[in-house]
Image: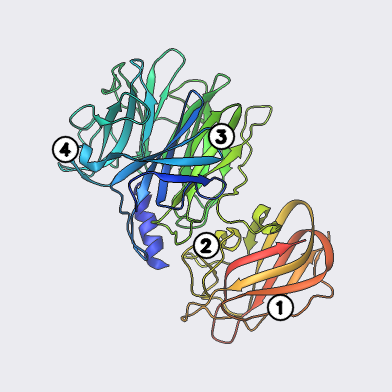
Amino acid sequence: MRRRRAAALAAALLLLLLGTAPPALAGAPITTAIYTADPAALVVGDTLYLYTGHDEAPTGGTNFVMRDWHVFTSSDAATFTDQGAKLAISNFSWAGADAWAGEVERGADGKYYWYVPVNGNGAGWMDIGVAVGDTPLGPFRDAKGGPLVSDSTPNSSPLNIDPTVFTDDDGQVYMYWGSYYGLRAARLTSNMTSLNGSVITPSGVTNFWEAPWMFKRNGVYYLAYAANDSACSAPGYACIRYATASNPLGPWTHRGVVLDQVSSTTNHPAIIEFKGQWYMVYHNASSPGGGNFRRSVTIDKLYFNADGTMQKVVQTGGPVTPGNLAASATASTSYVSPWETLAAVNDGYTPANSADRSHGAYGNWNHQGTEWIEYRWPTAQTVSRSEVYWFDDDQGIDLPASCRVQYWTGSAYADVPGQSGCGVAANTFNATTFPAISTTRLRLNITSRTGYSTGVLEWRAFS
């Protein structure tokens, strides 16, 4: 989590249970009993452990409310059981708030160390503490009695958040952390509770914002992290980029984007191999009632190319309408307002009404006239139906005057032949049907009413 926070808060302004819960199917959120965020993953024997933050912001809240961390377990990466809150701010006598993104690592002594950023009661803002437990489920207790990293640590980040901890094959332990102020790294001592040497600023990590996650595969070091540059995400949102290195402290070489932006403003990766399959664990806003401060952890499979680069993860988290081709499409547009997000149109969410922007909204204020949104697929898709749910904020964005569906013929855009009327009703999906066409691009042209702009909450496409 973190003070991308600052960006997340600005974007949002513009725009329970602590006991165990029954197992919940993955693919959608790992649980809908509570809101979860900032996942970390650990494999011990035949069990996958997910350590998550706990979002407790009220409906409509505009800030993070996080007081404890939960642990979820799975034997198949498909169903998860909430083992309850296993660590809380109250476990650290020197801390007062903000149970943000942490990670658990097994020490050479067989104990489990949970590194977490918390708002300390002393000078500065965020410190990194460490708790210890005898098992992956604890019980956990403060292992140090004070911060491992604070503002007084030489060369620490002005915002010390999001620690990721990695043990190399030789037993040396490394910790990376940081925020938009910059990435930091250091070795840890064998007792897991002290820094071993100076804090460094790693090089080569392109567009780093927050949320680092480090792992090793086939002798190569990988560092995944949240980036919010315009090349990979809408303003106020973040994708997950990654870099590789031949040394655990770098220098790093940027390799690309492994996870596109999600439906929440923040994005946070955990990458783990479990029973021969690699997974990307992350959060989004796709749980019922979810939002930027009420997020939900989900999990999807991750694949590597023969050269060791990672393929971009296909997001299946959240409710996906069966047969909806939009889920696998890349969206583009003629224009999107800086405080709105194109990612909302194919996140699979079913709005409650045309004013429901809880999962974000596409809008093109203050443009008037005709604008478009478009889906592209790497291979041709057979499409015979389009469904659009319009956004109306009762301000500058209103229901459109008209719309029409177009497709790419291979050389130009043309109206889809034989299409039924393109509806402009509020509070419902407006369906347009037509004889099946085969195309790699589908476009929705939207013409505004006089004096207004237009917006879309969700756009579906079906065979």
Looking at marks 4 and 3 on the same chain, the residue that comes earlier in the sequence is marked by 3
Closer to the eye: label 1 or 2: 1
Residue 372 versus residue 347 in the image, above or below: below
Disc 3 is placed on an element classified as loop
Distance from disc 1 to disc 3, alpha carbons, whole Å, reads 44 Å
Label 2 to label 4, Cα distance in Å? 41 Å
| Closer to us: 224 or 110 | 110
The quadrant in which residue 450 appears is bottom right
- 61 lies left or right of 91: right
Mark 3 burial class by Cα count in 10 Å: few <14, some 14-19, many 20+: few
Q: Residue at x 28, y 27 (%)?
A: 132
Q: CA distance from mark 2 to mark 3?
A: 34 Å
Q: Position of residue 408 (x, y in %)?
A: 79, 62
Furthest toward the bottom, the residue is: 450
Categorize mark 1 by other alpha carbons within 10 Å: few (<14), some (14-19), many (20+): some
Determine the residue positioned at 49% across, 23% down: 45
Q: Residue at (74%, 80%) from the top-left corner? A: 421
Residue tagged 4: 93
Type of the residue with mark 1 = Cys
Front of the two marks 4 and 1: 4
Q: Secondary structure at mark 2?
A: loop
For the residues labelled 1 and 2, say whether their Cβ atoms are less than 8 Å apart: no
Residue highlighted by disc 3: 76
Which residue lies under the disc numbered 1? Answer: 422
Q: Which badge, 4 or 1, comes first in the chain's sequence? A: 4
